[in-house]
Amino acid sequence: MQPFSFQQKMFLLLLAVVTIGFGWILAPYGGAIFWGVVLAILFAPIYRWLLQRTRNRAALASFLTLLLIVVIVILPLTMVSVSIVNQAASVVEMVRSGEITVAMFFNKIMAALPNWLVSLLDRFHLTSLAYLQDKLTEAAAQVSQEVAKRAINAGLYTFDFLTSLCILLYLLFFLLRDGDKLAKRIREAVPLSRKYKQRLFQNFTTVIRATVKGNILVAIAQGALGGLAFWFLDVSAPVLWGVLMAFLSLLPAVGAAIVWAPVAIYFLATGSIWQGISLAVFGVFVIGLVDNFLRPVLVGQDTKMPDYVVLLSTVGGMALFGLNGFVIGPVVAALFIAAWDLFITASEFHTD
């Protein structure tokens, strides 16, 4: 292999610099771009179907697919967000009016606990309402400061959100229309053999589709079931808690339980035995089994990754990249497995 000439090295350096610079420019709206790519991959089969029905009118098929995405994705998310805000505001108003107080819950729990447990908690000063109120007040003050800062910048956040949404929809139109050409150019630019590129790109699209569809379906199922259980048991703001369970269910195995388990314990501790037992049984054998059965089928089977790899990559991805990490983590894990599998099975590396 001939060594690179000085001109080739300078060109590679220029290529790296302009690529990093372009990525830096796009970074503020990286989330919108990322989800534009994800939605384009997810809805590509629908776009192709519409393309056939519109006699290969690419712009029309892309526009119709974009309208479909707005109707079945954007509008429902907006409606749920409005409902969450309304229910959160009602809970805050109940706290301000004194309808819900810390003392009320604290006294109910303390009265229902056995003496030995009360003695144990007393050693750590956890039976003193004044002590707990001081700690809660301190925590509430910190939260209030953060909320105040965000409230001051509410207009800026709203502008950023609307800008990101417009960028997402605008980019999505062109990704749907020109996605095949763009994917072909990217494949041609990757300096690997055709069979390696085909394997890696196939894994990339398969994992994105399986991860997003699988995790979102599991989240919707667990959130809906949890919200219905809370509504049946007359828990305040069931939509708020259902959506929270849906988001937390992105954490495999333990996500939704972070919400329903403390509520079940509270019911049991305050003497509402049948409510506590019902919620615990429903949480373990219905909400929990949705995660245990659907996630491996919808995510692990298509990605051909072990359950523990899906779990670790999802949790690690969300720790690093936030909500986007539930897609990025498994995609990186799948590419890692595919790349090492190719390295092990290939006798030599070459390019076409």
Image (tube, grey):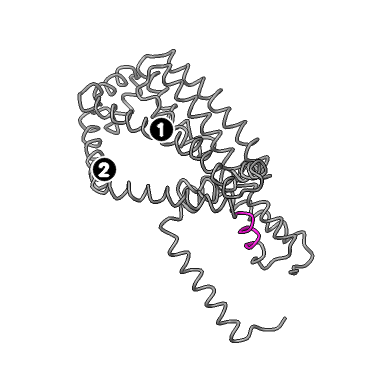
SS under mark 2: helix
Residue 91 to residue 348: above or below: above
| Place of residue 344 in the rendered image (x, y in percent of width and height, measured from the top left) | 74, 60
Tell me which corner region of the image, top left, top right, bottom left or bottom right, holds residue 105.
Answer: top left
Range covered by the magenta-colored residues: 179-186
Q: Which numbered disc, 2 or 1, marks the residue that appears first in the sequence? A: 1
For residue 147, which numbered disc appears in the image?
2
Q: Residues within 10 Å of mark 2 (few under 14, many from 20)?
A: few
Residue 295 to residue 28: above or below: above
**Residue type of the residue flagged with mark 1:** Met
Residue 125 to residue 181: above or below: above
The alpha-carbon separation of the residues under discs 2 and 1 comes to 23 Å
Which residue corresponds to the image point at 74% horizontal and 69% vertical from the top-left? 351
Residue 45 to residue 19: above or below: above
| Place of residue 40 in the rendered image (x, y in percent of width and height, measured from the top left) | 57, 48
Tell me which corner region of the image, top left, top right, bottom left or bottom right, holds residue 116.
Answer: top left
Q: Which residue is mark 1?
A: 79
| Place of residue 341 in the rendered image (x, y in percent of width and height, measured from the top left) | 72, 56
